[in-house]
Amino acid sequence: GQQVMQIPQYQHVQEGEDFTTYCNSSTTLSNIQWYKQRPGGHPVFLIQLVKSGEVKKQKRLTFQFGEAKKNSSLHITATQTTDVGTYFCAPGGSQGNLIFGKGTKLSVKP
Amino acid sequence: NAGVTQTPKFQVLKTGQSMTLQCAQDMNHEYMSWYRQDPGMGLRLIHYSVGAGITDQGEVPNGYNVSRSTTEDFPLRLLSAAPSQTSVYFCASRKQGGMNTEAFFGQGTRLTVV
């Protein structure tokens, strides 16, 4: 599996502020997935990006895949307390070994 | 649909004890994996399997054994538990596909080794 660097490691925001987490790779990725893990919970799949420059939206969440397919971002507009958790990216591969980034832990102050 | 079921949810072991963490999925997924999660370290892959009878090592395999005798089950064995194996363990499964497919996770097993 391919390795990625995820930044920042932690982010504290005031409710209503925007939030962005980045996933960077030194090599070209075939695709990338994003997962969310609520505190005390298990990771849950959010989305998969496949195409260069692809942008997908899920309500207040916007996912982007870079033109060179070496980076990806997740942007949350106007955060809510329900957005609290850790967001992981996972670069794609044809093998069975799905490797995750270290995640960005988001806390939201009401 | 149960999805991915892990047992037990919590476990305390003494150093040197052995145990098996169970994982079962009912989605007929070919791929199954075990991860451990430690603070600040994210999800690290321990072992994975691409089908019955086939297993391979991940990033942190030392101290753990796996086997895959059926499509449904993928147990993780700790032969001689050490305090460094205190962690939360997640099992995941996903369907084999041309591109990566969505991974489904179990609820996790919180293991403490004293």
Image (cartoon, coloured by chain):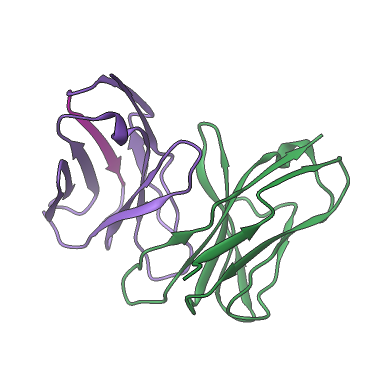
Front residue of A43/A28: it is A43
Instruction: Mark yes or no: residue B21 visible.
Output: yes
Quarter of the figure with residue A108? top left
Q: Which residues are magenta?
A: A17-25
Front residue of A78/A49: it is A78
The letter of the green chain is B
The answer to if A18 sits in the magenta stretch is yes
Q: Position of residue B73 (x, y in %)?
A: 63, 73
Instruction: Please give the count of numbered marks on the rendered protein.
Output: 0
In this picture, residue A63 sits left or right of residue A92: left
Q: Residue at x 53, y 64 (%)?
A: B4
Q: Residue at x 66, y 55 (%)?
A: B61
In this picture, residue A91 sits left or right of residue A19: right
Q: Position of residue B94 (x, y in %)?
A: 44, 69
Instruction: Mark yes or no: residue B78 visible.
Output: no
The C terminus of chain B, quarter of image: top right
Q: Position of residue B97 (x, y in %)?
A: 36, 76
- B89 w.r.t. A103: above or below: below
The answer to if A28 sits in the magenta stretch is no
- B100 w.r.t. A108: above or below: below
Q: Residue at x 41, y 44 (%)?
A: A101
- B37 w.r.t. A48: above or below: above
Quarter of the figure with residue B66? bottom right
Q: Position of residue A79 (x, y in %)?
A: 21, 30
Q: Residue at x 31, y 47 (%)?
A: A26
The letter of the purple chain is A
